Image: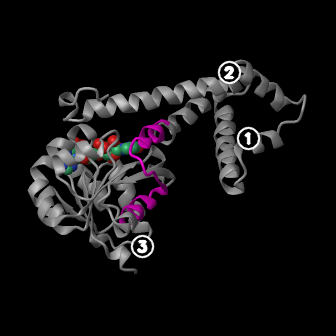
């Protein structure tokens, strides 16, 4: 076991996302006994306990006192209530904070937690099956070791990338954060279209899901640009070309652009709604 794996990692909030991160850390060889989780819900603690010999508590103070890295994994709306009473403890202990709460800016987080080294992370739902895309932003106070710690936690649930400007997290939210739902929606549309063409629902679903998995794996594993992969399977005058012509006539590229823009704009307004200081800061949001 490396010294990295021996870092004590705490989670405030032991719900779905924390469970996938803890499960991933244990699978990656992190000592379960060096993981601390607090959650007021006995059911959440029990579910966490089934992953391994994790230190469980109903007391957030105890977790703050025990760890080097503290993952903030409560709902964004609960974060202020959770962090504010911990501020003086956090100032003494000075763990690296890693927030996975959607839409909460580092300014909002620091207004409750104080000026600690802070990594803000935007994960996505496939983290729940170890295939997440987590994008991280570090405040200036985070050093190389802190970045490595945050990466270790998030890598346990899938791929990790960094952005150097916090504002880019709005675009990230619109692409990878909300992105799984776009693919699910395309799957829904393809399953319905298959049924319209005479397949039974179960068959259509099986074809669509395996095709989505296969296409994603080809794009990832080949490293070839998706546009090039599309051209490679599109013979002039063939069946794929007929479908792609219909997509082009419906302006699929423009439609996706408008959808992603709408999500990015909503990310900005949501962040302003969640920021306790935004109401006092004219011109924001
Ligand atoms: N799920 C995703 O795919 C996803 C994707 C991107 C970002 N995120 C972010 O990840 C965070 C967690 O999401 P989630 O889906 O894991 O939510 P979740 O399942 O509701 O987990 C949150 C947990 O925090 C607990 N909690 C509430 N108040 C607390 C307190 N005072 N101290 C300690 N724990 C407390 C909740 O307990 P109770 O149930 O008893 O309230 C719950 O078990 C959110 O901020 C969300 O924005 C999630």
Q: Position of residue 7 (x, y in %)?
A: 30, 72
- Assign ligand 1 to one image quadrant: top left
Which residue is labeled 1 in the image? 227
Q: Is residue 91 above or below residue 227?
A: below
Upstream in sequence: badge 2 or badge 1: 1
Count residues near mark 3 (Cα–Cα under 10 Å), then give few for <14, some for 14-19, many for 20+.
few
Disc 1 element: helix
Q: How is the image coloured?
A: one colour
Which residue is labeled 3 in the image? 29
Looking at the picture, tell me which residue is in the foreground, 239 or 53. 239
| Quarter of the image that includes the N terminus | bottom left
Count residues near mark 2 (Cα–Cα under 10 Å), then give few for <14, some for 14-19, many for 20+.
few
Q: CA distance from mark 3 to mark 2?
A: 48 Å
The boundaries of the magenta stretch are 149-174
Q: Position of residue 248 (x, y in %)?
A: 73, 23
Query: Is the CB atom of the residue marked by disc 3 within 8 angstroms of ligand 1's nearest atom?
Result: no
Which residue is labeled 2 in the image? 251
> Which image quadrant is residue 10 in?
bottom left
In the rendered structure, are the residues bearing label 2 and label 1 in contact, judged by CB atoms less than 8 Å apart? no
Q: Is residue 154 magenta?
A: yes
Looking at the picture, tell me which residue is in the foreground, 251 or 239. 251
> Which image quadrant is residue 81 in?
top left
Q: Position of residue 17 (x, y in %)?
A: 36, 50
For the point 25% across and 44% down, the residue is 107
Q: Is residue 242 above or below residue 99?
A: above
Q: Is residue 277 left or right of residue 141?
A: left
């Amino acid at each position: 076991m490396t010294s990295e794996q021996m870092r004590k990692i705490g989670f405030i909030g032991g719900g779905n996302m924390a469970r996938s991160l803890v499960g991933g850390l244990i699978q990656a060889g992190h000592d379960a006994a060096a993981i601390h989780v607090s959650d007021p819900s006995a059911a959440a603690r029990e579910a966490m306990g089934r992953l391994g010999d994790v230190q469980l508590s109903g007391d957030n103070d105890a977790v703050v006192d025990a760890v080097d890295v503290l993952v903030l994994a409560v709902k964004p709306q609960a974060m202020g209530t959770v962090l504010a009473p911990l501020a003086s403890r956090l100032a003494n202990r000075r763990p690296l904070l890693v927030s996975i709460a959607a839409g909460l800016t580092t300014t909002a987080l620091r207004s409750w937690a104080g000026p600690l080294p802070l990594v803000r992370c935007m994960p996505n739902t496939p983290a729940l099956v170890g295939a997440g895309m987590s994008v991280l932003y570090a405040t200036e106070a985070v050093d190389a070791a802190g970045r490595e710690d945050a990466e270790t936690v998030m890598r346990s649930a899938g791929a990790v990338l960094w952005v150097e400007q916090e504002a880019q997290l709005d675009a990230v939210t619109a692409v990878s954060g909300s992105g799984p739902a776009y693919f699910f929606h395309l799957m829904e549309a393809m399953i319905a279209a298959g049924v319209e063409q005479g397949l039974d629902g179960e068959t259509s679903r099986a074809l669509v899901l395996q095709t989505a998995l296969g296409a994603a794996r080809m794009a990832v594993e080949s490293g070839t640009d998706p546009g090039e992969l599309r051209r490679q399977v599109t013979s002039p005058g063939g069946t794929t070309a007929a479908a792609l012509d219909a997509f082009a006539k419906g302006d699929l590229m423009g439609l996706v652009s408008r959808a992603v823009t709408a999500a990015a704009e909503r990310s900005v307004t949501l962040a302003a709604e969640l920021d306790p200081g935004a109401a006092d800061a004219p011109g924001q949001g």
